[in-house]
Image (cartoon, rainbow, N blue to C red):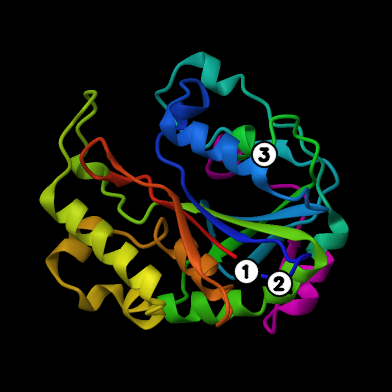
């Protein structure tokens, strides 16, 4: 990594309740934030903003979005009042070789973003822009699109992708200390092994892996953000796993950085 290049970060964001209940994963995000050179702005790719086409938030003051239901009122009261960056939104549009919608009204900072940013940058004083996931794209298309964002890292922009490598809500066990499903551990371990080996193709083509992959990724939107971080890696860089674990039996909290 060059001395001025920002790392690319993937965070397994897990339950929104982590915003109220610190744990070893939120402690890892806090420690990571303290270790980073302060960026001029943050570009977030969150599993919770899936669109038709590619959109990017372009408002100067993005709202905090509480895109969930059934949680305590205290969670809905959390605000993350970071400024936006219309200039970064314009730069993203300039870099991507497809039409991009500059969005100024409908979105903001969703919980896939602020639940992690709350610990990375608790003062909410670094501008935040979100890039959507085009729901019609294949895993390969997401990866290739993300490659076009590489110049941002040399422009002091931190790129944070937020999702979960294993994310099966249908099989959750909410109790503390729930044992991981063997298939969840198997696929998570496979991902980590391929990450360290720089075997990106096997992670892009995750659906070739078999039953453990399909149980781990019943829908792909929480997996795609990991591909954005992978795509930002150049040949001289290595991946570092800064936290890992399976929570609620079927949610991977794996987080890794590229630098």
Pick the front one: 213 or 186: 186
Whether residue 107 is visible, yes or no, is no
Establish if 102 lies above or below 253.
below
Under circle 3, the secondary element is helix
Whether residue 253 is visible, yes or no, is yes
Where in the figure is residue 42, as x and y percent of width and height?
A: 72, 53
Under circle 1, the secondary element is strand
Marks 1 and 2: in contact by CB < 8 Å?
Answer: yes
Query: From mark 2 to mark 1, how far is it between C-alphas?
Result: 5 Å
Establish if 16 lies above or below 230.
above
What residue is shown at x 39% (from left), y 51% (from top)?
164
Where in the figure is residue 85, as x and y percent of width and height?
A: 83, 53
Indicate which disc, 3 or 2, sits on the residue closer to the N terminus.
3
Tell me the residue that label 1 is attached to.
Answer: 54
**Which part of the image, by quadrant, shows the C terminus?**
bottom right
Tell me the residue that label 2 is attached to.
Answer: 100
Determine the image quadrant of residue 179.
top left
Write down the region rendered in magenta.
90-116
Establish if 92 lies above or below 159.
below
**Which of pointers 3 and 2 indicates the residue nearer the eye?**
3
Where in the figure is residue 11, as x and y percent of width and height?
A: 49, 49
Tell me the residue that label 3 is attached to.
Answer: 34
């Amino acid at each position: 990594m060059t001395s001025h290049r920002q790392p690319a970060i993937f965070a397994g964001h897990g339950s929104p309740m982590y915003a109220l209940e610190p744990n070893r994963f939120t402690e890892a995000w806090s420690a990571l934030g303290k270790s980073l050179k302060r960026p001029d702005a943050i570009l977030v790719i969150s599993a919770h903003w899936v669109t038709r086409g590619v959109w990017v938030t372009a408002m100067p003051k993005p709202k905090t979005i509480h895109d969930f239901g059934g949680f305590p009122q205290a969670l809905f009261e959390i605000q993350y009042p970071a400024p936006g960056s219309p200039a970064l939104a314009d730069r993203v549009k300039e870099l991507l070789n497809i039409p991009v919608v500059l969005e100024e009204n409908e979105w903001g900072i969703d919980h896939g973003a602020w639940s992690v940013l709350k610990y990375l940058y608790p003062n909410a004083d670094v501008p935040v822009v979100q890039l959507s996931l085009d729901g019609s794209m294949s895993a390969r298309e997401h990866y290739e699109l993300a490659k076009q964002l590489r110049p941002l890292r040399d422009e002091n922009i931190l790129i944070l992708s937020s999702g979960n490598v294993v994310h099966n809500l249908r099989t959750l066990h909410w109790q503390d200390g729930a044992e991981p499903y063997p298939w969840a551990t198997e696929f998570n371990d496979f991902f980590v092994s391929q990450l360290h080996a720089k075997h990106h193709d096997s992670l892009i083509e995750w659906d070739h892996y078999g039953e453990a992959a399909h149980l781990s990724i019943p829908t792909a939107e929480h997996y795609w953000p990991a591909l954005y971080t992978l795509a930002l890696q150049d040949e001289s860089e290595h991946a570092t796993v800064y936290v890992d674990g399976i929570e609620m039996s079927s949610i991977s909290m794996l987080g890794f950085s590229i630098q």
